[in-house]
Image (cartoon, grey):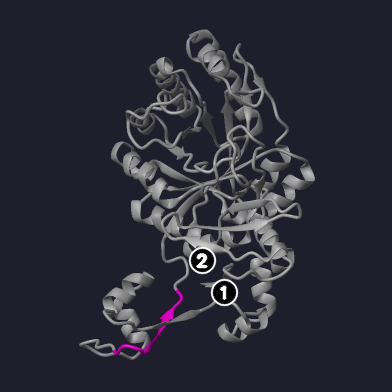
């Protein structure tokens, strides 16, 4: 696999000739039929068996092999270079494609229930790339009961791909996470026990593989109550042969203040849960100022703290499958930016003749455009380059895997890059 960035004057035909890959193949892999035209700056996934590299001043066989993640001996043999491996500036090296050379990865994805037909189509498209799927969500009530959801199509279709279903419980209510509901559950042993009894009943009846607890905006003073609840939940889950996972706000230190952070005790979750999902996205969010949704420099700050207090093999890094389209100038409290898929972003760029740019610090693509009413917009989204940067970060930190929010947004490149780099763990056989 090669990632190619469209240049001025490029056409699908010229790119096809350049890489020796058919136009139909490039179009199919990138779902170019969903986009009106190629966009300058757009990243394309090109399925190739090798790529080329022109030697630059300062290069060595070791530095080039390290850059492409292969052994220098392999690179030397592939290009017929003998010891002492002397390179000449300007010479072209063939770089062999090494599929799945980054090992094994666990992959979770959240999915919002819609219709059985839509759910089935979504899971059929991505099921082979998933370890877990998590319908979002079973909302808890003050008294320990749950709002049931019909996720039968999700679970049954996922099972066809040996994807394990996780039951997500949340304190979500009336459009936001409720601190009061969480307190009602966490502060009353009888109510928390009732909730866990109800959870176990549903998990057994619907054959879930495990539980994902996503309680957010918990009162800071309820931090230890939440830890105690999770210990109780872990004990019950393990006695019934289920796994326990939790979702954690993206903290950069133990002292981070704010209603979303203080009650999330990273060391405790790392000790109690079988694995945790870090919600490393939403720096740029619908109601906030225009920013990359998951800038890698910000993500790394969260990971730096997380791996210092949680075993890396218990950590799944959150990844977004979407972007946002903001009107400019941004006004706090103004209209929310709509969430859009990466394919939608490229369609907008093509329609308005925009050029996609790439922020190398955030490792995120973006572009500007003026709409029909001459209002300026900025769009931050994800592409093949940004997800590859995130996957390499997972490898660097030695993490368990990744977790996507949220299925249903068209982003074919993500799955192509994921598949080219990793073997996907299947916990069901």
> Label 1, on which residue?
47
The span picked out in magenta is: 88-97
Q: Is 291 colored magenta in this rendering?
A: no
Secondary structure of the residue carrying tag 2 is helix
In the image: residue 183, left or right of residue 24 = left
CA–CA distance in space, label 2 to label 1: 9 Å
Rate crowding at label 2 as few (under 14), some (14 to 19) or many (20 or more) other CA atoms within 10 Å. some
Looking at the picture, tell me which residue is in the foreground, 332 or 419.
332
In the image: residue 125, left or right of residue 222 = right
Residue located at (35% from left, 73% from top): 70
Residue located at (51% from left, 66% from top): 420
Residue located at (46% from left, 26% from top): 239
Say whether residue 427 is visible: no
> Label 2, on which residue?
420
Picture coordinates of residue 49, whole percent (x, y): 51, 79
Looking at the picture, tell me which residue is in the foreground, 280 or 230.
280
Picture coordinates of residue 195, whole percent (x, y): 57, 17
Say whether residue 86 is visible: yes
């Amino acid at each position: 696999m090669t990632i190619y960035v469209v240049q001025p004057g490029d056409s699908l035909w010229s790119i096809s000739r350049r890489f020796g890959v058919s136009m139909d193949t490039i179009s199919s892999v990138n779902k170019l039929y969903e986009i009106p035209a190629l966009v300058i700056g757009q990243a394309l996934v090109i399925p190739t068996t090798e790529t080329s590299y022109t030697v630059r001043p300062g290069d060595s066989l070791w530095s080039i092999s390290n850059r492409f993640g292969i052994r220098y001996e392999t690179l030397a043999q592939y290009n017929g270079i003998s010891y002492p491996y002397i390179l000449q500036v300007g010479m072209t090296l063939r770089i062999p494609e090494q599929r799945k050379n980054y090992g094994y990865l666990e992959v979770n994805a959240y999915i919002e229930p819609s219709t059985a037909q839509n759910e089935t189509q979504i899971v059929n498209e991505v099921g082979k790339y998933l370890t877990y799927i998590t319908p979002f969500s079973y909302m808890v009530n003050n008294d320990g009961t749950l709002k049931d959801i019909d996720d039968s199509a999700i679970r049954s279709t996922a099972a066809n791909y040996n994807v394990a279903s996780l039951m997500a419980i949340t304190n979500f209510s009336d459009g936001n996470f409720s601190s009061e509901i969480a307190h009602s559950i966490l502060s009353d042993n009888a109510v928390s026990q009732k909730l866990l009894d109800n959870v176990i009943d549903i998990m057994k009846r619907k054959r879930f593989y495990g539980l994902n607890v996503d309680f957010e905006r918990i009162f800071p003073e309820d931090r230890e109550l939440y830890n105690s609840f999770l210990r109780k939940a872990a004990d019950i889950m393990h006695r019934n042969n289920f796994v326990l996972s939790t979702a954690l706000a993206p903290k950069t230190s133990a002292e981070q203040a704010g209603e979303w952070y203080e009650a999330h005790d990273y060391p405790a979750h790392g000790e109690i849960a079988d694995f945790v999902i870090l919600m490393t996205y939403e720096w740029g969010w619908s109601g906030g100022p225009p920013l990359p949704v998951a800038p890698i420099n910000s993500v790394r700050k969260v990971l730096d703290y997380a791996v210092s207090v949680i075993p890396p093999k218990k950590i799944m890094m959150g990844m977004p499958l979407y972007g946002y389209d903001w009107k400019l100038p941004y006004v706090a409290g103004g209209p929310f930016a709509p969430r859009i898929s990466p394919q939608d972003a490229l369609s907008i760029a093509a329609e308005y003749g925009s050029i996609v740019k790439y922020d190398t610090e955030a490792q995120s693509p973006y572009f500007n455009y003026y709409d029909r009413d001459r209002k300026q917009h900025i769009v931050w989204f994800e592409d093949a380059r940004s997800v590859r940067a995130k996957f390499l970060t997972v490898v660097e930190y030695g993490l368990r895997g990744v977790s996507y929010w949220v299925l249903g947004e068209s982003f074919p490149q993500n799955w192509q890059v994921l598949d080219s780099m990793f073997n996907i763990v299947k916990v069901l056989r």
